[in-house]
Amino acid sequence: MEIKVLGPGCANCKKLEANVFEAVAQLDLDADIQKVEDIQEIMSYGVLSTPGLVVDGVVKISGRVPSVAEIIAILKG
């Protein structure tokens, strides 16, 4: 599973990244978590409001910080 956290490094972006790590740890998933700070790459996903959460190439959340429980639900699919 590939997970990308999209954002330039703002407080909300850092919070989303922390929540993603927590959710992955709780699920004991083998996931490749990447932080994407390049604006061009972020825009290539169609995300205009950060932070964004991309799972296996699909944008799941943008413009807000989901809770750990919400991220777990997304990752369980």
Image (tube, helix red, strand yellow):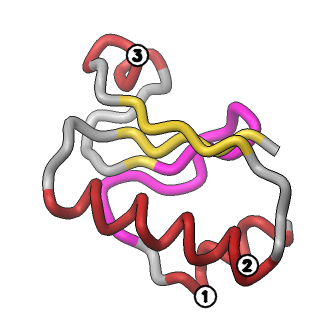
Contact flag, marks 1 and 2 (Cβ < 8 Å): yes
Of 49 and 69, which appears nearest the observer? 69
Residue drawn 61% across the image and 45% down it:
33
Image quadrant where residue 3 sits: top right
- At which x and y percent is residue 26? 72, 83
Three-letter code, disc 3: Glu
- At which x and y percent is residue 35? 43, 38
Q: Mainly helix, strand or loop, the magenta region?
A: strand
Q: Which residue is mark 1?
A: 69
Q: Secondary structure at mark 1?
A: helix
- At which x and y percent is residue 48? 28, 34
Q: Which residue is mark 3?
A: 41
For label 3, count other residues whose C-alpha is less than 10 Å away and answer few (under 14), some (14-19) or many (20+).
Answer: few
Q: Horizontal placement of 7 versus 11: left or right?
A: right
Numbered badge on residue 73: 2
Q: CA distance from mark 3 to mark 1?
A: 27 Å
Segment colored magenta: 53-65
Residue drawn 73% across the image and 78% down it:
73
Q: Horizontal placement of 47 versus 11: left or right?
A: right
